[in-house]
Amino acid sequence: MNDDDDAADYRVLMRRPGFLVRRLRQIHLALFAEECAAFELTPVQYGIMTAIRQQPGLDQMRLGEQVRIDHATIADVLARLEKTRSGDAPAGRRAGTNGV
């Protein structure tokens, strides 16, 4: 293959929505990691914390619905966020509210 073939292949890829969406996600994650490195947060954790801040008192089920995460994952992420809090009392669990 030569450079012209490589350029033609790339142009074909640039017309495919799936390729573009994947590249957008890669770029988004790289920018997020760069900007939020000091906070040691993942995009999922950030989304959860944003939802909690904007809608205080959400229970885990509704929080999961808001951020489109299943209840097993939301419980795990909340547990990890609670562990990172220094000296605070744990937030509400299943039936309770989240105060991460």
Image (tube, rainbow, N blue to C red):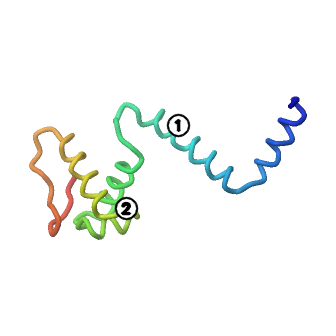
- Indicate which disc residue 59 carries: none
Q: Residue at x 76, y 48 (%)?
A: 13
Residue 3 located left or right of residue 47: right
Q: SS at mark 1?
A: helix
Is 73 on the left or on the right of 98, as rendered? right
Q: Is residue 87 above or below residue 71?
A: above
Query: Which of the two residues, 43 or 19, is positioned nearer the viewer here?
Result: 19
Q: Secondary structure at mark 2?
A: loop
Kind of residue indicated by mark 1? Ala
Quadrant placement of the N terminus: top right
Q: Position of residue 74 (x, y in %)?
A: 29, 58
Q: Where does label 2 land, which residue? A: 69
Residue 69, by quadrant, is: bottom left
Q: Amino acid at mark 2?
A: Ile
Q: At x 21% / y 40%, what residue is drawn?
A: 84
Q: In the image, residue 50 lies at what x, y percent?
A: 36, 55
Residue 52 image position (x, y, % from top left)? 29, 59
- Residue occupying the far right of the picture: 4
Identify the residue shown where x is 11% and y is 45%.
88
Side (left or right) of 49 relative to 19: left
How packed mark 1 is, by other alpha carbons closer than 10 Å (few <14, some 14-19, many 20 or more), is few
Residue at label 1? 30
